[in-house]
Image (spheres, rainbow, N blue to C red):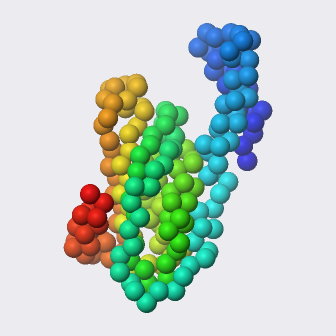
Amino acid sequence: MIDQEKIQQGVRLLLEGIGEDVNREGLIETPERIARMYEEIFGGMEEDAQVHFQKTFHVENNEMVVEKDITFYSMCEHHLLPFYGKAHIAYIPDGKVAGLSKLARTVEVFAKRLQLQEQLTAQIADAMMESLCPKGVMVMIEAEHMCMTMRGIKKPGSRTVTIVKRGMFEENPELTNLFFQMVK
């Protein structure tokens, strides 16, 4: 559970640490605003992604299902700076499918935590494998990291791409190629 008071205390200390006057008009309510914002952007900390896969639908067709261009926003656990981008998900059902919005909701749950992009990609794939028991899953995430854009190397526009394959996608390069063609 998010502790609003601790966040507010931390923000006050941070502001003092960078030499700001926490009693300055523009900053008086900043600790409260940031605490409320953190409650929203870290809302996935308390949420179980498996919940979104509890309702499924029986299907005879076991062809690839692709949901692409799922926008997400997350926070890098190394610098506490945002990274954001698109997730692309494919799976081969084994008799059951989830509602399409459930894939986006799963991305959202894991993105609303302190994250590493590599970990986020794997968490989405593993949650789908565990909940839906498909024949295979592939997740690709393309993201821009503010720690690369506004500090350090300062390379805006650079994107990091991570890919995780499970099941049939690991074994069948044709499926992987089809996925890449579909998300192009």
Query: Total of numbered circles in the picture?
Result: 0
Q: What residue is drawn where x is 46% and y is 46%?
A: 116
Check the image and report above or below for 139 versus 32: below
Q: Is residue 122 left or right of residue 171?
A: right
- Viewer-closest of 45 and 55: 55
Identify the residue at the far bottom of this view: 60
Q: What residue is drawn where x is 56% and y is 79%?
A: 56
Q: Is residue 101 left or right of residue 141?
A: right
Q: What residue is drawn where x is 53% and y is 34%?
A: 80
x and y percent of residue 19 in the render?
A: 61, 9
Residue 130, can we see it? no
- Viewer-closest of 10 and 141: 141
Check the image and report above or below for 53 versus 71: below
Q: Which quadrant holds the C terminus?
A: bottom left
Q: Is residue 150 left or right of residue 80?
A: left
Residue 150, located in which quarter of the rendered image? Answer: top left
x and y percent of residue 154 in the render?
A: 34, 26
- Viewer-closest of 25 and 116: 25
Q: What residue is drawn where x is 50% and y is 33%?
A: 81
Check the image and report above or below for 8 versus 74: above
x and y percent of residue 168 in the render?
A: 32, 76
Residue 99, can we see it? yes
Residue 64, located in which quarter of the rendered image? Answer: bottom left
Q: Is residue 183 left or right of residue 71?
A: left
x and y percent of residue 130 in the render?
A: 51, 73
- Viewer-closest of 77 and 105: 105
